[in-house]
Image: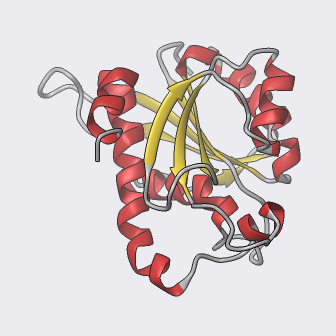
Amino acid sequence: MANDAWLVYGLGNPGREYESTRHNIGQMVVAELAGRIGAGLGRSRQRARVGTGRLGSGAVPGLPGPRVVLAVSTGYMNDSGGPLRRLMDFHSIPVERTIVVHDDVDLPFDTIRAKLGGGEGGHNGLRSISSVLGTRDYVRIRAGVGRPPGRQETADYVLRPFSKDERTVLPIFVSDLADAVELCIAEGLLTVQQRYHSR
């Protein structure tokens, strides 16, 4: 794999019982991107499901778009860092070309934010990644899922499916998040922030 490739890593948990939960929205975004480029997500030796291809159109008309590796871990959220590190090493992709897509309870539902670095906000997947990579300086596409109602524990909240009202918006939200990933790769983090942080 060429060094100009990007790695897009969607966080979540394995298994059918988790696939429609708030904690798995990162994996939903990777599935959306894979569908756009016709890439199946097959199991790999890096303890992940991986698909490769080219996103969208290139910066120069008539030329192919950027090469991407799309991946989700086959392990649990609190061990997200190990598979990511192995994928980066196997595909020779540096941290500056790595994008992590994840849920964020500190943002209202249907909110998109993008940033480089920062804290983990109690997110076990991000904590694992930062620990394994030895840096917090990777791009995050943050998908707002809202705060838990009442006194419900955050851990219980993110492991539950989206509400009926949220599910009506969810396909558009996931599509918008995938658009944000593509825009980040094509035009950079600042462009994503300018487009989505004011919506």
Q: Please identify the quarter of the rendering in which residue 62 is found.
A: top left
The residue positioned farthest toward the bottom in the image shown = 164
Left-right relation of 96 to 17: left
The residue located at (29%, 47%) in the rendering is 199
Which residue sits at x=52%, y=16%? 2
Residue 78 or 150: which is nearer the viewer?
A: 150
Check the image and report above or below for 77 versus 67. Answer: below
Q: Specify the color scheme.
A: secondary structure
**Residue at (75% x, 46% y) in the render:** 48
Out of 123 and 97, give the one closest to the viewer. 123
Outermost front residue: 150
Residue 184 seen in this snapshot: yes
Residue 109 drawn at (x, y percent): 49, 62
Depicted 122 relative to depicted 58: above or below = below
**What percent of the width, then of the height, locates residue 159?**
76, 69
Q: Position of residue 81 (x, y in %)?
A: 81, 34
Q: Is residue 75 left or right of residue 38?
A: right
Q: Which quadrant, please, contains the N terminus? A: top right
**Residue 65 appearing in the image:** no
- Describe residue 46's horizontal placement relative to residue 41 as left or right: right
Q: Nearer the viewer, residue 118 or 2?
A: 118
Residue 35: % across, % down: 43, 59
**In this rendering, would 73 be left or right of 103?**
right
- Which residue lies at the image location 51% right of the left edge and 86% below the top edge? 164
